[in-house]
Amino acid sequence: MAETTAHAVAHHAPPQGPIRKYVFSTDHKVIGIQYLTLAILSAFIGMALSWAMRIHLAWPNASIPLLAWLSPNGAPNGVMTPEYYLSLMTMHGTIMAFFVLTTAPFAGFGNFALPIQVGAADMAFPRLNMASFWTTFLGFLLAAATFAIPDGPPISGWTAYAPLSAVGSAAGPGQGWGQTLWVLAVACFCVASLLGALNFIVTTLDLRTKGMTLSRLPLSTWAWFIDAWVSLLAFAVLLPCGLLLALDRLGGTSFFIPGGSVFNDKVLPHSGGSPLLFQHLFWFFGHPEVYIIILPAFGIVAHIFPTFIRKPLVGGWKVITFAEIAVGTLSFIVWGHHMFVSGMSPYMAMVFSVPTLFITIPSVIAVLIWVFSLYGANIRFDTPMLYCLGFLSLFITGGIGGFFLAQPSTDSYLHATSFVVGHFHFTMGLSAVFATFAGFYYWFPKMFGRMMNETLGKIHFWLSFVGVYCVFMTMHMTGFAGAVRRYSAFVDDFMVPLIPIQKFMTVAAVVLGAAQFIFLFNAIWSRFKGPKAPDNPWEATTLEWDTTSPPPFDNFGGRQLTVYHGPMEYDGDKSVMQTSPEPSIAGT
Amino acid sequence: MVGKVFAVVVVLVTLVTAYSVITHVWWMPVDISVHGPKIDHQIEETILVAGLLFIAGQVVLATFVFLYGGAKNKPKQIPGGAKPLVLFAFILVGTEVLALSFIGSKAWGAVYFEAPDPASMKIDVQAGQFAYYFRYPGPDGTFGKLHPELINEGNQNYFGLDTDNDADAKDDIVTAELAIPVNKPILLTLHSKDVGHSFYVRELRVQQDFVPGLNLPIHFTATQTGRFEIVCTQLCGLGHYNMKAYLSVLSQADFDEWLKKQAAMQ
Amino acid sequence: MKSQHRVAAVAVPVLLLAVVLLCTVPDVAAAAGQIVGTVKLDGTAPHQKPIDMSKDPSCAQTRSGPASMESVVVDAKGGLANVVVYISQGLSGNEPALSQQVMLEQKGCQYVPHVVAVNPGQHMTVVNDDKTSHNIHPDPKPGGGNNAWNKSQLVGGPPIDVSWASEEVAIPVKCNVHPWMRAFIVVVKGPYGVSNDSGSFKLDGVPPGTYTVTAWHETYGTQTQKVTVAADKPATADFTFKAK
Amino acid sequence: MNQSELAVVGAHGTVMEASPFGIEKKKLGMWIFIISDACTFGSFLFAYGYMRVGAPVWGAPFELSSIVNGIVMTAVLLSSSLTMLTAVRAAQTGAKASANRWLGATMLLGAIFAALHLREWIKLIGEGWRLFSNPTGGATQFGACFFSITGLHLTHVVTGVIALAFIARGYNQGRYDESHVETAGLYWHFVDLVWMFVFPLMYLMNAK
């Protein structure tokens, strides 16, 4: 055993040289920041794509200059063709769902904060950790590469329903090499997520410092821990789903392609496959995926809340955590609500509808905990807290839409309308993004040792908050009018009258997007010019605030840490560090 | 200060939203099917239930932020702690949810659990990139067999009918527009020749996917004459946005007239 | 000053060369003969079903009168249109590709013309005159040297310029947005002609000699005959297809 | 040194909170991997079941000889689990030499299993089975399911053999200790367990 410890210490010695320090680093803090950088890059790419799409929807003949350069084939003179619209839509979904929403709040902040919060020097398997980031990055490159090939990215949406995604270029441009690259990209992302989840679970269970019992874990750590389990099981199903799709595309198998499929008057040499099998496999991952995205958001908000309301959450760590566990568990038995109108047995629809409705109960509990924790609080409105409050409002709104889509009868009218688009942008999209912003403003001082600018932060918040409602609440409304999603132009008689409101959405979306550049500027400027940050700027109590900003390579400079309290020792302006032996003031 | 602004903004947003939903600024088109009112009623029901939660949630959030923003007094917890909140969630939301699923299942059952009227008129619908085609069985009342290898759209053989050798297929009437007699139960069989598509008619409150390899039945009865749009709601490729057909609900007489004309054009 | 000399030194021979080339081209044309003829259909053409375009109302805006299938188009006197006549044997094989642009229009949700002939490497332009967007989807035989492609053309979108690498009779073209749309692209070497509505066609610039001439029709297949072309007067080659 | 001690001494020699299951991190990591890998195999088998139930005619390929071959493979893999077990025991009692011998035996059996399996593959391919075709005229999915699922399992076996080779080498040179051997054993037993599902589902259920 002696030699293993020695060995472990040896490969934990601070690395030398910029490459080992900042590029191929095994330091969880660096890896976390790498993940966040990738997520921000992806977010701006995805945002640019959404701008292009929105402009095209409102002004179909508008020429978008950069587009002509990006793809002279897909957008002659900068006016995008229908297939290129779908390509952009597919990549918007893929990049946002995988490389932003799954990456930032979980892999990004999780990597940076989880080991410090449990008092560990690093993740359980640092080299595995590095591998998972670079596998994610490889996936990102593969996805980005689809823009470079002549046919452009796939046009089958981020859900890549078979057989559209399975039969190759017969189904349309982008379905050849584009779709193949896409499948490989997703496969890489699966592997990376599995390795990451494994690392998170082991770290949380085995690397907690003395006194950091499970009941004293910070709530963010709890959420990441639960989330790791969900992604461990979900991505382990997306991977085979992708492999089978790849086999259908490259190996000539017929898992998802039925017999007698006719493209261009030619019958394909396939038989016996089932498109529904694909949908089942995909949504078995796909629905937990939205909780993989939102659970870390829960955790970040639950973690930041007590610091800025200066009191523990109602019900302590237990209620909120058990709510998260319930959400995570239920998320595995509700996937069928994506398939109400897809030819699944109507009785199954009822079976899936009930748990879907019941999953609102733990969600409502979480929301009630946050809202009623505000009662009798001393709320401090620093930017992180503003974003938490924004998250609450968005999440409540988004959750409400769920009631309509969870019932087959109402879903049969609203399914595939812009109501759905509005709904998921509120619940998993922007709720998670707001939580990510909260986390970013909150941990930035710890990451870079400098404070971000409060004024810019607040301007960024107000524009984003109002912008989100203008864009996505309006989508709920057009959804009631039956506006169909994933249309690259509105040619149907009943859609044409909706074009003015589409124009409003587009303008709002452009403003919303522009506001994000304030954030970008704030982040970059503060990184180098911001005022020096103290070790504990928010007067928080968890371990990451119990070390220097930024923390040393081994997080605590070799200090022996012992934890005496839970994470929510707040009482007004007083607060007690988890590591301080003083008596508890909030009884956690 | 910030807290008060936040509270005001949240309340404003809530009011605007509530207003536009209640006054139906953008709303569902008139309902022309027999089962439709059940679905509409369910949507109204849900708006009531969910709407109350929405307003309550946002307003309580706004109030607390308004009251306790920047307060300096010693923090206190809500009396009773978490128990009442959890109970509230379980009892109130639980009952709402149960109510919705039970009433909802009635509406759903009315569409999908009831067997189609045996007297209903059978029409075969085929979706393909990027158009719908409809097939009426013709005088003999039976559909001809489908031969995918015979599909030749340039020669107008969309279904792959073997009209030379198949007597049943000879009198099948293939149309690009779905015409149905009003107040007559209709039974559609949906099948796709290539990828997934969907059959969505807002006015009928009907949406059903086409799944390649499956023949999916959907039945309804239209109660008003008129011309409505059938649009595709399942992403099917570059022409998805342009994949549509017209549904014309005609009086029985007009329908017979129309069918005769179509038969002549075969 | 010096630089101008250099320019001149380059320009003069280039100009001379150009002049020489220009003179030689018409020579060839002058020496070349012609093949003319008509294509007839013996028997009654199959019923050409009318096309229901109600799917896309904007199709009607750019067309006059109803549309029908074009698999067999004959006039009152039995003249068969849309037949491609080309030289299948007897050419030197190194004729340069014709330079003029061939046009394929999308008009009233049908292709005009229904059958296009081009040389390998000859440029053809696809334009959209309709108030709706189309996708052009040529589907050549795999491995035949021509690549399949599939591209949308928006209302008022820029023309698409294409050329085909190797000979192929015939490449079917379709529009998936309007599935009834169908055209054929015939890629052949040397002179070619396409029969018009009265069934008559003309092959220009055929050097004197004896050739095997092939006529191809989408429904009735091919026919061939030997033709001897003299420089002075046009040779005739008539074809008659039997209706099935 | 035993598990609980392992658990409380972290990479830095700092005092740690005991792991709730007293499982040392490498081993816990392997357990987690096994859970997710089980889901992956599960989905493949689910797809196989879905395909098979949906197919009107299936067309089973295996004569007795193949079944016998399968049984032999099963026996080989099972006994390899046994040798692995002995290797771990030996390693835990510090009997390096015998641990190495048993590891060698395990690798050998793994290799034999792979060889037998490849023979089966070659036989099927010779009979005209492909990912996309079925010489008996039944559903084409048998080839697809058989080659993909057993292929996945075979990859696991081969990876396992290679991993064992590395572990054994490191163990010899003292870079690795008995805990590494034990973790590798965990993986090996899992691969064996998966075969216990694959064999009846892919072989026995497809006997003529």
Image: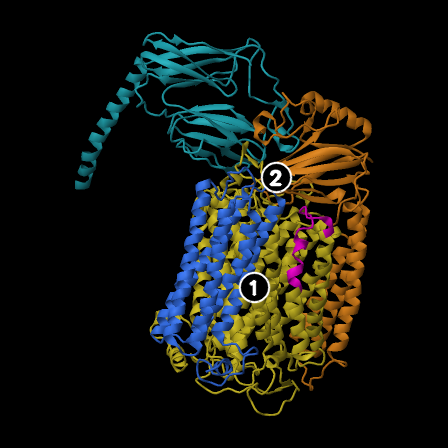
Chain colours: A yellow, B orange, C cyan, D blue
Residue A105 is situated, as x and y percent measured from the top left of the image, at 55, 67
Q: Residues within 10 Å of mark 1 (few under 14, many from 20)?
A: many
Q: Quadrant of residue A286?
A: bottom right
- For label 1, the SS is helix
C188 w.r.t. A157: above or below: above
Quadrant for the N terminus of chain C, please: top left
Task: Kindly identify the amino acid type of the residue bearing the numbered disc 2.
Answer: Asn
Task: Kindly identify the amino acid type of the residue bearing the numbered disc 1.
Answer: Ser
Q: Quadrant of residue B138?
A: top right
Q: Which mark is residue A231?
A: 1
Residue extending farthest to the top is C233
Provide the residue span drawn in magenta. A330-347
Same-chain status of marks 2 and 1: no
Q: Say which of C144 and A447 sits in front.
A: C144
Residue D67 is situated, as x and y percent measured from the top left of the image, at 51, 50
Q: Are marks 2 and 1 in contact (CB under 8 Å)?
A: no
Residue at screen point 72% across, 40% down = B217
Tag 2 residue: B242
Quadrant for the C terminus of chain C, please: top right
